[in-house]
Amino acid sequence: MTIPFGKPMIGDEERAAVAEVLAGTTLTHGPRVKDFEAAFGEFTGAEHVVATASCMAALHLTYMAIGLQPGDEVIVPAQTHVAMAHAVEACGGRPVFCDAEPRTGNVDLDQLEGLVNERTRAISVVHYLGLPVDMDRVVEIARRHDLVVVEDSAIALGARIDGTHVGLKGDVGCFSFYPVKHITTGEGGTVITRRGDLAERISRLRAFGIDRHIVEERRHSGAYDVVDLGLNYRLGEIGAAVGIEQLKRLPGFLDARARNWRALAAGLADLDDVDVIESDDQGERKASHYCLSAVLRGPLASRREEVIDGLKAGGVGSSVYYPKALPDTSYYRERYGYRDGQFPVASSISGESIALPVGPHVSESDVETIVAAFEKAVDQVKAHA
Ligand SMILES: *Cc1c(COP(=O)(O)O)cnc(C)c1O
């Protein structure tokens, strides 16, 4: 029996909701996507919510909506999911990478402003492992240079700053409902924003750039004009039906994640040569506890594969967030000529950390199993030095 790194929590409610959609004939352009958007708005406090096919789609639509052009630059964390950089590239823009800070893995705010120049259009940040970035500082820098702020909140659903949900301090927040994230719709994502102008544009670009994006607005089927170069990045009714049920369970999921994260961190606290990346609450920055990442130091640093094998032997699944710093990936190396050592903190986290499960599928006794398996794996690696 293995404790997987992540596991979608699908229950009878989700199955019944899907069956109900399939019993009807409305598979897209229906009421469930609207209900899901409304419920997501209620949970986050967002005025505008536009559900999308994925977080990648949400990010791409965001850059399309702000009119990102070839030659434009966007600051992107070096330590994040490749979707953040690809969304910029897909618009012909250039991601300019910013290294992480070692304690939290969030973007190093002391380096951010130095990357801004006359071509910069936007700053993007990721709330790494669910710990909110200090958005007041990011927004202040952005204001000074008239830049758009994009918050990738794909692993930060439930995280808040002074009570404000992440994604709402900047101009746009993007979320993922991929199966192992906080909630799932199969594939899916969303944009939240305070800005009605951006929501309107993103919503139109989500559906081919058609002027009447709501079916009821069309006098008869097919009566519409095309006013923009849009894509088809919609979420469907089946996914939305699952998402509605998932949102009802989200508060319980978040409680379980916080409990598991803290118990696991306490269990690993005394291990030599293992540093836990700080992703618990920090004052009024409330975290969403996506996973616990342990960075291997000293004699363990170069021996991650062996530790992962040991965990597997002990019945514990793991992952790496994220497996390569973006400037270390082949695509971005070949395109922009990055070299080893330019983003030392991001490279060290991606090269030497192991992400452990804390999701709601993990029980309190599972946490003990994970701690014991980790200790044993580390001991064995050290014994074979
Ligand atoms: C998972 C993830 C994404 C991609 O989400 P999809 O919905 O699979 O497109 C983007 N950004 C971050 C930070 C992620 O963790």
Image (cartoon, helix red, strand yellow):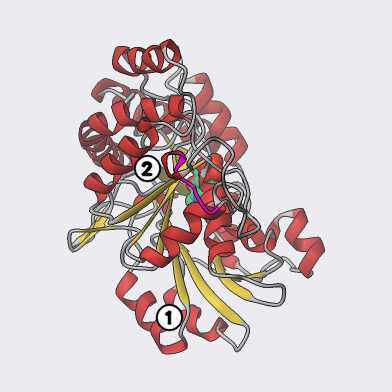
Place of residue 126 in the rendered image (x, y in percent of width and height, measured from the top left): 45, 59
Residue closest to the eye, 159 or 146: 146
Q: Main secondary structure of the magenta part?
A: loop
Tell me the amino acid under the disc marked 1: Ala
Residue at the extreme front: 219
Q: Which label number is shown at residue 290?
A: 2
Crowd around label 2: few <14 · some 14–19 · many ≥20 (10 Å): many
Say whether residue 213 is visible: yes
**Magenta segment includes 122:** no
Q: Report if the CB atoms under discs 2 and 1 are less than 8 Å apart.
A: no
Segment colored magenta? 211-215
Name the quarter where the C terminus is drawn. Answer: top right
Q: Is residue 339 above or below residue 313?
A: below
- Residue sitting at x 75%, y 68%: 339
Measured in 3D between alpha carbons, the distance from the residue under mark 2 to the one under mark 1, in whole angstroms, is 27 Å
Q: Which label number is shown at residue 362?
A: none
Place of residue 375 in the rendered image (x, y in percent of width and height, measured from the top left): 40, 33
Tell me the amino acid under the disc marked 2: Tyr
Report which residue position mark 1 lands on.
142
* Image depth: mark 2 or mark 1 in front: 1
